[in-house]
Image: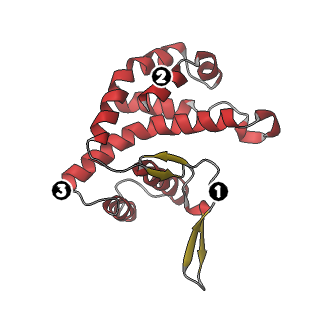
Amino acid sequence: MPDLYKQLLSQKDCLIADGLSETEISQLQGLYATISHLCKKLSRYSIKETLVQPDFNDNNVLFDDRLHNITIIDLGEIAISHPFFSLLNFLHVIKKYHGLTEIGDVYLRLQNYCFKKIMPFASEKRLLDAVSIARTLFFVHGALASYRLMHACDRTKFTGSFQQQGRISPSLKGLIAACI
């Protein structure tokens, strides 16, 4: 992730066109050591990489009430990465579209359920520390996922929000706010 982050920051024209200022890009470049450190710290938890669906949310989950099956759809952006990123995205979307807050009972129960099923942690504090690190890195993950999608597709065939600026910069601005 640190190398991909560095590559993304080298695309200065793209980042400026997406809505970042030169000052913000400079701040992001200054965060490279922090990102590297956080990645190393998160890797010490020995949580195995898995298939990650960057758009994992309730709109991409189908339920078959008759057969009691669950199907996850919209797999075009699947990558191998840390499983916390899918779970954090799921929680982010739930918060965004269903009016939950990070301190609300429903949100906290969902968060507990999601993360405790990944692997047994020696303590609640250790689990919350790992989630906290992943939350900061989630901004980088989101920016990289958006950048990868934008450059994997022929942008001339897309309309609407895909062509608008601001697909990468909100995540990177969130990273600045989380780290500074």
The answer for how far apart the CA atoms under marks 2 and 3 are is 34 Å
Image coordinates of residue 116 in percent, x first then y, are: 31, 61
Q: Amino acid at mark 1?
A: Asp
Q: Earlier in the sequence, mark 2 or mark 3?
A: 2
Indicate left or right for 27 with 146 as reference.
left
Image coordinates of residue 158 in percent, x first then y, are: 78, 40
Q: Mark on residue 74?
A: 1
Residue drawn at the location 64% of the way across and 56% of the way down:
74
Quadrant in which residue 67 is drawn: bottom right
Residue drawn at the location 77% of the way across and 35% of the way down:
154
Q: Mark on residue 114?
A: none
Q: Tell me if residue 7 comes above or below residue 138 in the rendering.
A: above
Which of 145/160 is in front? Answer: 145
The answer for how far apart the CA atoms under marks 1 and 3 are is 35 Å
Indicate left or right for 1 with 33 as reference.
right
Image coordinates of residue 173 in percent, x first then y, are: 48, 29
Residue of label 3: 123
Image coordinates of residue 179 in percent, x first then y, are: 35, 29
Residue 167 visible = no
Which of 54/89 is in front? Answer: 54
Figure disc tally: 3
The chosen color scheme is: secondary structure
Q: Amino acid at mark 2?
A: Lys
